[in-house]
Amino acid sequence: MRIRRPLGGRRNRLATTMMAAGVVLVLAGIGVLVPPLLGVWQRGSHDHQLLQKWLGNQGAITKVLPSQAVAPAGSSSPAAAAACGSGSPSSEYLLVAFPTLPGIEGVAGNGSWALLTQRSVVHYSSSPGPGQEGNMLIALHREPNFEPLGSLRVGDPIVITDRACTKFTYTVTQVWIESPSKVTQLGQLSGGKYLTLITCTPLWVDTQRIVIRAELTSSTPTT
């Protein structure tokens, strides 16, 4: 005579197996999500420190001109010139700000796109600098500090401040979506002074690129 095993035991084993599988999947998901999120947090923290350094007491420093410079009348000390960014040029190359997006600004490093693994804003070192002829290239991560960049429109200003504290205002002339493979083909432009910003979209998915093209419309030298 066959002895039937109680159904309750089978169900308990099945529930235990399913629960264990669920725990494994949750842990695997955490393992996949945590490293990228940690990287975003670390990058955002670094961005914040650089911005505070540029804007704070340590950011707006002065440097003494060579001894042959003529001192102002009535002064016995050499003349001084304003200087922005107290770190190395590769770390604190320029400040980019968006007047139509209050509070959205950041300090760009100067290097290759590989620098984007460490920070959110990078000026491509092979492209022109602020105010120079040609097409200045800047790439930005939108997460975590530049999420509103997707709302920039034609006619909006973008203000670049260089290490001499000169402000260059570029006005947006084009905004479009591009595939990542085509972004690398953005060539040099001639006959003007341009700025091209490249950032990712959609947020936290980053399968496409927003390209923002702007043209220099004014500059304010340090007085």
Image (spheres, rainbow, N blue to C red):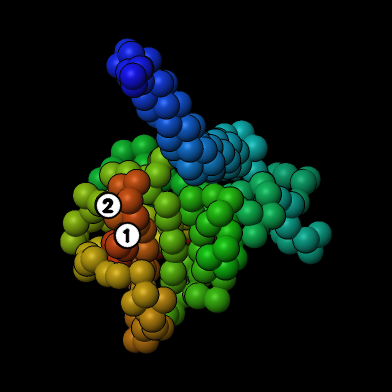
**Is residue 26 in view from this perspective?**
no
Q: How many marks?
A: 2
Q: Real-space Cα distance between discs 1 and 2?
A: 7 Å
Lower position in the chain sequence, tag 1 or tag 2: 2
Query: SS class of the residue under badge 2?
Result: loop
- Dot 2 amino acid type: Pro
Q: Secondary structure at mark 1?
A: loop
Residue at horizontal 37 percent and vertical 63 percent from the top = 198
Q: Which residue is mark 1?
A: 207
- Residue 53 pos. (x, y %): 60, 38
Q: Amino acid type of disc 1? A: Thr
**Between 196 and 129, which is closer to the camera in this rendering?**
196
Residue 146 vertical placement versus 192 (above, below): above
Q: Residues within 10 Å of mark 1 (few under 14, many from 20)?
A: few
Q: From where the camera sits, is residue 27 visible?
A: yes
Q: Position of residue 44 (x, y in %)?
A: 50, 39
